[in-house]
Amino acid sequence: MKFDTILVLDFGGQYCHLIARRVREHEVYSEIVPYDITPNQIKVLGEKFNIKGMILSGGPSSIYEENAPRCSPDFFNLNIPILGLCYGHQLIAFFFGGKVEPARTKEYGISYAVVDSPRSLLKDLKENQKVWMSHGDTVYELPEEFEILAHTKNCPIAAFKHKEKPICGLQWHPEVIHTENGTAMLRNFVFEVCGCEPNWMMEDFVTRAINEVRRIVRNGRCVIGLSGGVDSSTATILASRAVGKNLAAVFVDHGFMREGEPDFIQNFFKKFDISFLSVDARRRFLHKLKGVTDPERKRKIIGEEFVRVFEEVAEKIEADYLMQGTIYPDRIESGFGKHSEKIKTHHNVAGLPTKIKFKEIVEPLRDLYKDEVRKVAEKLGLSKQIVQRQPFPGPGLAVRIIGEITQGKIDVVRKADRIVTEVIEAGKLNESLWQYFAVLTDSKTTGIKGDARAYGYTIAVRTLESKEAMTANFAKIPYEILEKISTRITNEIPEVTRVVYDITHKPPATIEWE
Ligand code: XMP
């Protein structure tokens, strides 16, 4: 079955994923593609998806810049509905001969739009709308064949539609939550303008994924790297439903797991009838990391060593197929990101460069976002303990120890992490937080312990609110909770003399310190 699909053309905007996710919240499938995709490539995609609309994303460029990204003008004649957002909105105006200029007054943040015509995208919306803007250029004039749907104080054409073709634009960002009725605007585009059917549902997904795995693997042997995170756990259960005893799940303990984690994972998966192999590789990893302080080198060494251990096991058990818990953002981020900078080398099983020749790599979750994976995990009957686990980086606590990693430091950060977890969970804050953890900084500071001078480590506490980790806010948790964390860490971990709270959003910081 082909799903009704909205393509999001990526012009380098930081909100591309948000657009796709927001579309999917309406049970309509959405796929991100590079802005320079050709009409021919769209035709090929059309064999797999029922393409009902395209959204041109925002982006950091100005359309008049040399090499400004532009999509094929042929798209405007395909009769596929098109919505331009921010840069996309300006690009449509530019293509049709409108006047786009640097904004006389730039708008960043909340703005108030006046709806001049509550139709099309803005159907049924009230006259005054709180919207979120972030733009340097503005559309000042449009040709006759367009009509204006809304304006703001500084932006005369903040929303428009073509009079005959299904083409429209919004200067603001309906995908960010600060645009109060952004969901309704996208819903209007998806259903009113594109006429999509809401048929992208997680119930069907499970059956489809199991059938797909069976069709590929048949009677072959399959191996999966199981870290205990929600992605690999979900992929493991899905795969075991599909191929039963022909699946082997391999847990590699690199020594940077949280307290009790290796046992928890082993015990948890014992309940399922899955062949589970645990490999103790702690000494190997620590040895490789001796003297290494550069964060990217650490990540690379851990990633490579992981692959080596995993390959040794896969070779021993003679696996034919490699199953991975790769999800959609992993795939997109390692794919075409022409306009996005590489920030850090994310390590997880995704992207294993395999020496071993597997017949095929199977990635049943490759089209899903994290929140969709959580829904699948629930459908598969995985308990809350797994479904609601915080995301945990592949290199584990190693990226939460600044500077050289030693066993002593691992022990300190592990204890601090346990305390943060216990206090947050006792305060019932865990369900509203995206992540909460401790970082061992490389600063030592003076303190007093038991009436004597002490010189010890500084622990940083980080707690965050986020929807998908692309952006995140530090959480404004109560001082009493912070006080409990700080008191317990300094009391229970003799090596620590100071606790600080990280009050940086992402961006500009990243979630993990390294
Ligand atoms: P950053 O630090 O890039 O993190 O803002 C974004 C999210 O990704 C998690 N993270 C990782 N996940 N392998 C993973 O599977 C990694 O190497 C990795 N590094 C960071 C991080 O915890 C946050 O949720």
Image: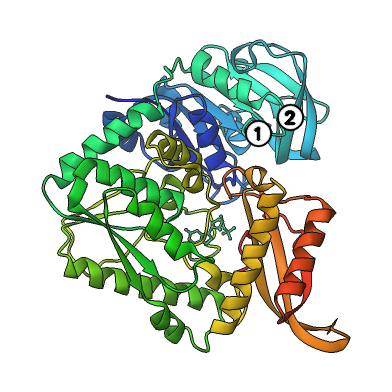
* C-beta proximity under 8 Å, tags 2 and 1: yes
**Residue 43 x, y percent position in the rendering:** 30, 31
Query: On the image, which quarter does residue 113 sit in?
Result: top right
| In the rendered image, the vertical position of residue 202 relative to residue 9, given as above or below | above
| Residue at x 66%, y 74% (from the top left corner) | 440
Density class for disc 2 (Cα within 10 Å; few <14, some 14-19, many ≥20) is many
- Judge by depth and name the residue closer to the eye, 162 or 501: 501
Furthest toward the left, the residue is 219
* Quarter in which the C terminus is drawn: bottom right
Q: Amino acid at mark 2?
A: Val
| Residue indicated by mark 1 | 173
434 shown above or below 50: below
Chosen colour scheme: rainbow
Q: Residue 130 location in percent, x, y? A: 77, 26
Name the residue type under label 1: His
Which residue matches tag 2?
A: 131
Q: Is residue 323 visible?
A: yes
Residue at figure coordinates x 62%, y 15% from the top left:
144
Total labels: the figure holds: 2
Figure check: 107 above or below 186: below
| Label located before the other in sequence (2 or 1) | 2
Q: Quadrant of residue 467?
A: top right
Name the residue at 63% across, 43% down: 431
**Secondary element type, mark 1:** loop
Q: Cα distance, mark 2 to mark 1?
A: 7 Å
Q: Position of residue 390 (x, y in %)?
A: 55, 52
Foreground pick, 442 / 131: 442
Residue 512: x and y in percent read 61, 63
Q: Residue at x 59, y 49 (%)?
A: 470
> Quick one: 445 or 27, which is closer to the camera?
445
